[in-house]
Amino acid sequence: MAERHIVAISGGGRDVRNPRRRIEVFERLQNHTDPNLFTPRCIFDGAVIMYSPRELPLSGRDSQTFEVNMSNKPRTDGSAPTRGIVQVSLKMVAADPIDFSGLQAFIDGKQTKQTPQVLTAINVLQLIIRQAPNLKYPNNTRAFFTKDAGIQPLGGGLELWRGYFQSVRPTIGKVLVNIDVSTAVMFKQGSFQAAALAVLKQHDVRALDLRPDSQQFRQLKNFFKGVSVTLVHRPGLKKIRGLVPNAGNFEFENTTVKDYFMKAWSRPINYPNIIGIQVGSKDRDEVIPAELCNIAPDQRYTRKLPPEFSPSMVKFSSKNPQDRLALISAGINNSITADQRSALDYQNSPFLQDAGITVSPDPISINGRVLPTPKIHYGNPATSRPVQPRNGSWNMIDQNFHEPKALSSWGILNYSRVSDQTINRFINTLLNACRKLGAIRLFIFCVSQTNLSILGMNLSPPAASQSCAGASSVVNDMRSLKHAVSNKIGNDPEMVLAILPTSSTDIYHAIKSFGDVIAGFPTQCVRENKIERANDQYCANLGMKINAKLGGVNSLPRSGALEKLTSAPFMVMGADVGHPAPGTINQPSVASLVYSFDRYAVRYEAMMSVQHPRQEKIDELRKLVYRAIYEFGERNRAAPVRIIFFRDGLSEGEYALTGKEEIEDITGAIDDVWRDKGVKGPKPELTFIVVGKRHHVRFFPKNRSDGDKSGNCPAGFVADQGVGNPAVRDFYLQSHGGLLGTSRPSHYITLRDDVYKHNTDDLQELAFTLCHAYARATRSVSIPAPVYYADASIPSHPIVCARGAFHFNPAMGFDAATITSNDDAFDLERWRKNFKDKHVNLSKKMNFM
């Protein structure tokens, strides 16, 4: 049993908004301000809720306000509150005590619904587990980080720390603690001056003599804003509000900063001309020279990591299964260093001891199985021999596309500085690769001043030549190329290939926008650093993307589960929602839906809709599904008998409500189509599955011989017992072969199942088969192809959701919008009016590949 209270914390500056700081304040309240009242210990979620194991005798009956002195210096009686005083108000919530009997009934299978009572009990256990390490280490509430688990310098004033993620997960018969290794980017403790030079990649302190309008000054100001520093000349912790140029000569009260520090602190300022930090409030501003500041310890870097550091981050975060499991075990069982307890330290947590909870240090063992691998068919399935994947991959040597598309009119725009010779060599390699794969009738028109002789085809000089300057000229370049190709070949280009500089986001977006929305032809972008070393393998991969964009089919995965579906018309759908970047709230979210329209679910049409920021439910799902079913019927002259719907992006807390509402939207769309088209036959059966990727469940083979060559469980490993949620039918499927680190299985949660009627074997096999249908790979991927196509979380390869940026009027500033706003100011209709669907010419073409 536990009682619930509302906690309000005020005073102490803006720091008290930080969850970790709030937890520190609350611990000070418990341990120093009134330890007798808070015995046994209470737990606090870092936001507004506190749980106590008994009813607290508060002075105001059901509420009380405390003054918490965060300083070790005693407060003088009768004096005004010092800056270290924080007010904490507790108010008992008029709600039933928290009872864990519902959770017990839930894991025992006597109760099938995850009621609010069950969810609250799980949340309390979660807080009990996390409370002790979150007080000791820097954390993001779900995971904490410690140097003892691993640290690596990153550069630019940053470093990488390892840590541990913890989560309480109910399953049949028991409650599990899910533990995983996690990684954080941290500000490097030490000299502020050294950190600033590292950010600028400079070594001479004179590089910090900056004008406030310089790019370097703005860079440092953005990087250090909100970072806390300690001071060399006196104790104290200050948060950086801004930077000041020429800080030593900054004037105030008839003196300068340099003179003040010499007079008051006997501190000569060696570099008065360089920057300093600005701290305090606007009413009480302070300027401190850079050389007197040190970056305080244990601060997480929460902004987007610069791309240059991504490879180091990936390498540091990737641990093979054996090393990952050993690190987790060390965090539970052993001292990581000789003089320190293990990081998780469940045995000594006072919160676990007070609650009477023990955690077994041994990982659980489960029985899984490996699904049969689908066969991959190229060419004509009736006459060709299928390819059998091994360890989640296969090759295309001596294989032809199942359905190659001809490319008779296309052109190249060159925005790079590579030579014509390099371009010609690349085109030769690409055309040879496409020819081997079965793509025929390839012709080339190149915007260049030179003649080309490719594969024996002699070409005259181009009908038009142009220089491609940059993003500002893309629209004119594309129109000019379109006209030139039309004049020379007799029809518009079927595709445009653009060669881009290594860093060229603006050009890329402009090209995609013109091709997808204005002109209606597929575009393929390649970067100059890729074509300079392009080989047969790279060009074959490029050929796969191009063929799919033109409407072709590269290969067919075949399995028993898929064959059962092909006995009658069926559709596979995938859906997701892409949200604005963190900190940006005046941009809409973009929802996507893809649906299959062929017999073997390898060709997909894509649709998008615009909705309120960060709303996970797809607002216009009913309209999108209506359109998908309607168009499917027009193309196939038959209504679908079965619909398999994969939904990406729903968290565990959204299964019940959002899943239920979206299922109602889908069935409502079916009703609408049947009514409007006057369909007399039965309505399609629906299976609705949520596919989860953002979780920390990992599987480790018990014996090395049971894993693949990377040490991971083999592709096709499925676990549906021992780790599932009692409230839903779910399973974990590791569908891809291991490459780097420990593979993450995908989590499948079935919310409705008319098609398979609880025959999990066929559903698992279908999901695994569709993981082999991703058109631009010769590897099985981690989630079914339709989910991958709809996915919003792959910025390096923008598929449907992430392509929303290409469909907005550029004047809307979709990519650059950073102005904050509230819900009342957000004009959804304005965004919808400035959003254009893809061009009709791209129908039946997977231009998003």
Image (cartoon, rainbow, N blue to C red):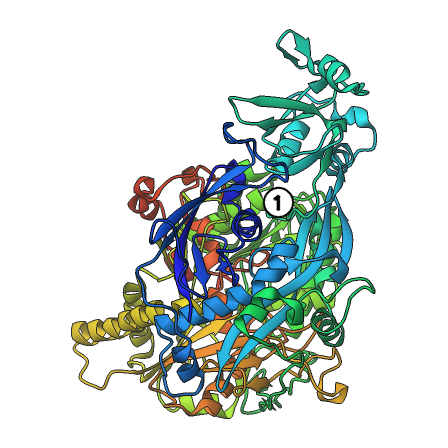
Location of residue 201 with respect to 247 vertically, above or below: below
Left or right: 96 in relation to 576: left
- Residue 339 appears at what percent x and percent y? 81, 62
Q: Nearer the viewer, residue 214 or 560?
A: 214
Quadrant in the rendering for residue 82: top right
Q: Residue at x 79, y 20 (%)?
A: 267
Left or right: 826 in relation to 480: left
Q: Secondary structure at mark 1?
A: loop
- Residue 208 appears at what percent x and percent y? 74, 26
- Residue 740 appears at what percent x and percent y? 72, 69
Location of residue 281 with respect to 816 vertically, above or below: above
In the rendered image, the quadrant that contains the N terminus is bottom left
Left or right: 472 in relation to 321: left
Q: Nearer the viewer, residue 711 or 498?
A: 711
Q: Nearer the viewer, residue 164 or 689?
A: 164
- Residue 834 appears at what percent x and percent y? 35, 44
Q: Is residue 213 visible?
A: no
Q: Is residue 391 visible?
A: yes
Mark 1 surroundings: few (<14), some (14-19) or many (≥20) residues within 10 A: some
Label 1 belongs to which residue?
504
Left or right: 505 in relation to 322: left
Identity of the amino acid at label 1? Ser
Q: Residue at x 55, y 64 (%)?
A: 407
